[in-house]
Amino acid sequence: MAFRPRKATGSPGAFIPGRLRHALRENSVIRFLLAHLLTLGIVMIICASGFHSALDIVRQDILESSGFAMEQAVDAVTNRLVTLRIIGLQVINTDSIRELGSSSPQDSNYAFLAQRAVKDYTEYLLYHEEALDQSSFLYFQNLDRVLYRGSVYRPGVFRQYLDSWNIDDAQWQTLSTCTDPYPRFWGNESGDLYYIFPCTLPFQGQYLGALYFRIGHDEIRQQFSFLEEYKDYTLLVCDENGQLVYSEDRLGLTETTPVSHWLEKAEARQEGSNLIWTVKADERLGLWMVLVLPEQEAMRKLTALSVQTLGLTLLAGILGCLISLYFSLRSGRPVNAMARALRRTEEGLSADLDHIGDAVRRLLEDNKNLQLQKEQAKPALRKAFFHDLLKSDFVSRSEMEYMAGRAGLSLTGGTYCAAVMRLHPQIDIDAIDGQTVEEARILQQAVSAEIDARCAREVWSYKRSTLITLYIFDIKNQEPLLQILRDVVEWLHRNYQVEACWGVSTPCTDLMDFWKNSEEASAALRENDGSDPVVVYSCARKVDDLYYLPYIVEDRLVQGLRSGDGAAVETVLGLLQQENFVRRNLGRIQFQRFSRRIVEILAARMEVAAEESPELTELNRLAFAFHGDCEPYFEALNSLCHALCEDTARQKSARRSENVRAIEGYIQTHYRDPNLCLAMVSAEFGLSEGYLSSIFKKETGINFAEYLEQLRVKAARVLLEDGTKVTDVSRMVGYNSIQSFRRAFKRVMGVSPSEYRR
């Protein structure tokens, strides 16, 4: 008899064995068990997804926090080394030090020279308590003597200190005979770092000796104290020539990898299982600092938390399954029994959950501490920002916004006021003696301390000259500030019998224009005749002397024209018109002199002779025809300057477009190279990564990575249509792995490579 297969029914249960279908229909225990397991599975999947997302967030936060801690440590070391550099340069350029280095022990005045040099050297070192060095000494080559701790030693006697610092005879011979004319760093096997400043005679170049600042291993480690929580790491400090001057290589990387490998560029990156932070210190120091952490070391807390979370999640799942199975088999109505069992195990599960909560809280507390360190660093960053602002070191708004952002500041939204103080207004500043210089230094410190005590908000200052100091005040209202300055003048006179006067600017609401307020304060100070110790720019008397065009205003005008910043140029021209024709009443001769200087600046910018330019000729004509109305002249001047700025902007845009076209050509030629990246292209074209990324997106509308990805996928489409294997296509278009290629292809095309070929 022939076998006849049974026809399949169309119901979903046709594929389930008959006995199981019967059990599902008749047995409430099995139905409950399956329903419970399904619910438990869904809950476990949701919990696992949530834990995975949370751990990713914590991982990124740990990486950012570690990078920030590294940057803070480098900034702290850099600031203190720069302080040492300033002191070192001052010491080696001191006349008494040079005279002693040029003398001989047989000279009749040798004892006097040595005493004076020791005195000057000791005084300089009294004022750098915040510097890193534990000790410093001066070696004079001609004398073969060492100046240390207020005495002059013979090398044999000084040997005891060298032994305590683990410097042997060969190392000392190398140090004392090196005549390198530039400051340099040197490290010994004990981990100490030496900052060395050669002392030479000016114009002659004769080498006299060197000043040595010794920075102990413990002092450096103190700045990198955040590394104490890590067991294995590598910390390297290299000079600008790539020479290793300090290292803590617990990973043994320098034995297998050349130091130059770490100094390719300043960035944070990952190589294999190692996280690497490379930071370049201040240009004046020429130092590179490198930190290498194994990822498992940096993430050990996260790893422990992940293991605990996974283990407890699995335990909870297994326990839930066992409880469900047991009570499902025991009773068809297991809900009450399960509730009783859960109550019995509630204490144990709560303890496990509390354990997870404690681990999470500890991890969050660690990151809060790093955030607290970040906040604690902001006062130092604010001090550095305002110091550069007072020195007028900022040019572009983007630079100022970046530095202000690091310090937690905004260029707008606050109100600031510039004020300039002059001590001894009756003294000719060109005729002051040494005693007056020393007194002025002490008085300026006393005044700054008194102002800080009287002002509720922060105050920053910058010493412009021996007698003149520029201040910037964070204010709400100018009137209380003026009263404080008058009180300070009275306090100075009452306690020290010293006169002082102030020039105060109008309030400033945009720190980008602070240079203008600084000049206003200086102008008010110049016009202070002593009748009122505090003169505000807006209330200062009008003057009718020489035209107004100081160097700082001229420099801002040139910078604005060079950068094509029309708004900055308009600000400068408005100030010139205000000063020359509102606060002054220039006559025809002075106005023509003013115009002549303006024409010279514009002619230099335009690279033409004044008589060859119709626009400049028109300016000269308007100045010659001046009869009290300056509006036509400044309208023509504004129009010409705006035209120059627009021309500069067009040229910059053309250069930017040309650069981007060249970059596109380079990418199209080298996109098959798997190492092609933003850093590689920026190095090829000599541009910073940030600038290249910015101009590329501005010109093409997409960022560098998207452009490269689309180019590679476009080439891959052609190869796939020709029948090339997916694995071969991945390699041919520049991907290191087939997984990366598939993800990129699906991101661009919406389908996988295999689906696209089908």
Image (spheres, grey):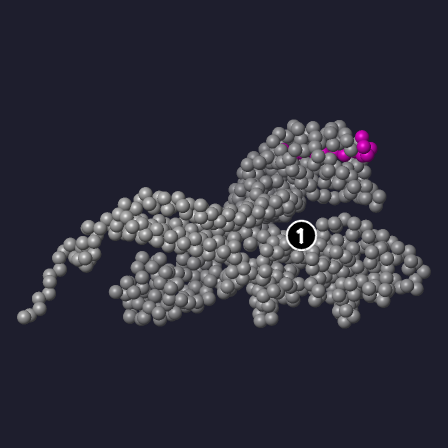
Residue 684 located left or right of residue 122: left
The residue segment tinted magenta is 494-506
What x and y, as percent, mark residue 561?
Answer: 56, 48
Q: Which residue is drawn at 69% across and 43% down?
A: 462
- Amino acid type, callout 1: Asn
Where's residue 680, x and y in %?
49, 64
View extreme (right): residue: 108
Residue that numbered label 1 is attached to: 79
> Residue 463, located in which quarter of the rendered image?
top right
Q: Is mark 1 on a helix, strand or loop?
A: helix
Instruction: Indicate whether residue 6 is drawn in magenta.
Output: no
Q: Residue at x 59, y 55 (%)?
A: 229
Above or below, 755 relative to 424: below
Q: Position of residue 566 (x, y in %)?
A: 53, 44
Please state, as top left, top right, bottom left or bottom right, where the N terminus lies in the image: bottom left
Q: Where is residue 348 in the image (x, y as percent from the top left)?
A: 44, 48
Question: Of 503 and 250, which appears nearest the observer?
Answer: 250
Labels in figure, total? 1
187 vs 122, left or right, is left
Q: Can the viewer see residue 211?
A: yes
The quadrant in which the C terminus is found is bottom left
Give the crowd class for mark 1: few <14, some 14-19, many >=20 residues within 10 Å: some
Q: Which residue occupies the foreground of this view, 336 or 537?
A: 336
Q: In the image, 140: left or right of 476?
A: right
